[in-house]
Image: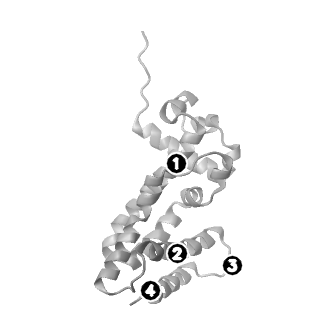
């Protein structure tokens, strides 16, 4: 009697990684589970066994991205809001394909693969906590924490997205622009 094939976490992680790259390179409409399995040197049966199908695989990719992003924010949080902003850009530049998948919206138009509310919501928690702490210390003006966090996130997200899309002048110094934006955000919300 044949032994059942066991698909472990390392294969799961490999499938997530190759899916990010394939979707980023080819777009979600052109990626098949056969492509994913081939790139990971496994079978489509393994993909179905671990994820259930394409929609679930893409959702897992997005959720995994939000968890990784949150981990980077948690690591930066003890240094305050400025450090969170720096970590945001660093993570996006280190994971451009994943960043595009998480925030680009292209996949959601193709298949139902929105992040789970828990994964996406938890990713923003370090920013909410930093805003609340800054307000409690008197360093940041009082306003609803969710409003301030969403405004800050939107500002840094916009600039990082422009940088990744290379939508500025060819000579743009994105690091300097980003540092200036972080300074402006800090001044804008200062008490």
Which label lies toward us, 4 or 3?
4
Residue displayed at 50% across by 30% down: 49
Instruction: Give the Cα distance between marks 1 and 2.
Output: 23 Å
The residue that label 2 is drawn on is 156
The numbered mark, 4 or 1, whose residue comes first in the sequence reads 1
Which label lies toward us, 3 or 1?
1
The residue that label 3 is drawn on is 170
Q: Secondary structure at mark 3?
A: loop
Residue displayed at 38% across by 76% down: 131
The answer to whether 106 is drawn above or below residue 137 in the figure is: above
Q: Secondary structure at mark 4?
A: helix
The residue that label 1 is drawn on is 61
Dot 1: within a 10 Å radius of its alpha carbon, few (fewer than 14), some, or many (20 or more) residues?
A: many
The numbered mark, 1 or 2, whose residue comes first in the sequence reads 1
The answer to whether 24 is drawn above or below residue 54 in the figure is: below
Residue 179 image position (x, y, % from top left): 49, 83
Dot 4: within a 10 Å radius of its alpha carbon, few (fewer than 14), some, or many (20 or more) residues?
A: some
Instruction: Give the Cα distance between marks 2 and 4.
Output: 14 Å
The residue that label 4 is drawn on is 189
Quarter that holds the C terminus:
bottom left
């Amino acid at each position: 009697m044949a032994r059942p094939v066991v698909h472990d976490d390392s294969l799961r992680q490999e499938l997530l990684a190759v899916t990010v790259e394939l979707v980023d390179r080819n777009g979600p409409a052109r990626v098949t589970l056969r492509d994913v399995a081939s790139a990971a040197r496994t079978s489509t049966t393994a993909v179905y066994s671990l994820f259930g199908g394409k929609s679930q695989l893409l959702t897992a990719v997005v959720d995994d991205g939000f968890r990784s992003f949150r981990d980077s924010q948690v690591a930066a949080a003890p240094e305050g809001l400025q450090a969170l902003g720096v970590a945001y850009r660093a993570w996006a530049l280190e994971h451009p394909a994943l960043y595009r998948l998480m925030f680009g919206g292209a996949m959601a138009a193709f298949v139902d693969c929105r992040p789970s509310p828990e994964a996406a919501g938890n990713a923003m928690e370090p920013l909410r906590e930093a805003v609340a702490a800054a307000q409690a210390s008197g360093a940041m003006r009082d306003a609803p924490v969710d409003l301030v966090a969403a405004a800050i996130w939107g500002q840094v997200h916009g600039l990082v997205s422009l940088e990744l899309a290379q939508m500025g002048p060819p000579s743009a110094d994105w690091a300097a622009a980003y540092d200036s934006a972080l300074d402006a955000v800090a001044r804008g919300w200062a008490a």
